[in-house]
Amino acid sequence: MTFINYASREINCKIVYYGPGLCGKTTNLQHIYDSTAPQAKGKLISLATETDRTLFFDFMPLELGTVRGFKTRFHLYTVPGQVYYDASRKLILKGVDGVVFVADSQEERMDANLESLYNLEENLQTQGYNLMDIPYVLQLNKRDLPNVVPTDELAAELLRKDEPVYEATASQGVGVFDTLKAVAKQVLTELRKG
Amino acid sequence: MAETPIVIHEHQFIKLKSVLARTCVECAARVVMLVDRDGHPLAFHGDIAGMDTTSFSSLAAGNVAATTSMAKLIGENVFPAVVHEGERESIFISVIGRSLLVVVFDERSTLSLVKIRTKKASFEVAAFLEEVARDSEEQRHSENSFFAEITDDDIDSLFS
């Protein structure tokens, strides 16, 4: 849920990166963190296991600039991708303003993508949202790997509405900011609609 | 947009800050914060030197979300308060509707004092939140909303 403070002239929004385990959600955040000026970001918090798998969530606040004198601050979250952390995923979707689905382009991860996407739709419904109505972007990640599904085929399987689709190689930063911009823009446009 | 944005106006913010300031003194606390359950810091008062209030708020919300789910697993609806006691600093979180009143205190105070004093403040905070929710809903449908005036160029300029 967006929070607007007229006293401090701030708009705060929540964006969640969703997707199957090891698809690159945390890598997206890490790249954003590494590429952003220190004054525009807060700490990158990772609640991870000892083997660096996301246990609860990753979080980083990011300030994009001002709109009509209001600072726009985006709180970026990732969910744990592993199937058995579903309770955590539900919690993180609470109050979400926009979602990025990070798909793993590798052939052998197609089933995992579909399972995670169904899970996203289900968990959004549990929280009272509909994927069709909320700001949403599809990112096709790991495009640099040799065994990837062609973009058209992957998009045909994963598209849910007329969402923007971005090819990405998050480990090299490719497509990461395009994805973020697309979802942030949708969130602000929704805010304008009221 | 699935939910109405929370909109806090300047006069409401001042009122909220004064409630938090008084609670901070009454609890002999280091910091008192009001955090949205989605992790947005709404307001705070006290000694926040060296404290990352944004990360703190996000973690407090995650903490309460996790304990609320644990409560449901054992047949409780919600744990109305969450306490973390440290060697020097402690944290008391009181759940008030969609928000969390968070008190950080040290050896100059006690948990029982904090519990008693926050109870009184929680009524005021609850009334405040109701007022904000009502105003936010009205503002959402107002054609004069500030946000209705945002143009595509305004949004694009953020990413230029």
Image (spheres, coloured by chain):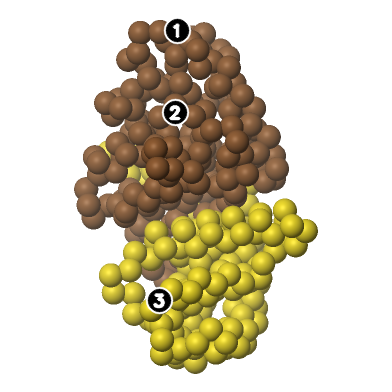
Chain colours: A brown, B yellow
**SS at mark 1 in the image:** loop
The kind of residue on which mark 3 rests is Glu
Residue annotated with mark 1: A150
Contact (Cβ within 8 Å) of mark 3 with mark 2: no
Chain letter belonging to callout 2: A
Q: Is residue B19 left or right of residue B74?
A: left
Do labels 3 and 1 touch, CB within 8 Å? Answer: no
| Chain of the residue displaying label 1 | A
Residue appearing at x 40%, y 22% in the figure:
A141
Q: Residue A75, percent across and down?
A: 43, 50
Nearest-to-viewer mark from 3 and 2: 3
Kindly identify which residue carries mark 2: A22
**Percent from the top left, x then y, of residue B17?**
46, 80
The x and y percentages for residue A136 are 53, 33
How far separated are the C-alphas under marks 3 and 1?
A: 56 Å
Q: Residue at x 62, y 64 (%)?
A: B98
On the image, the x and y values in percent for residue A188 come to 46, 45
Could you tell which of marks 2 and 1 lies nearer the N-terminus?
A: 2
Instruction: Please name the amino acid that badge 1 sits on.
Output: Pro
Q: Residue furthest bottom?
A: B26
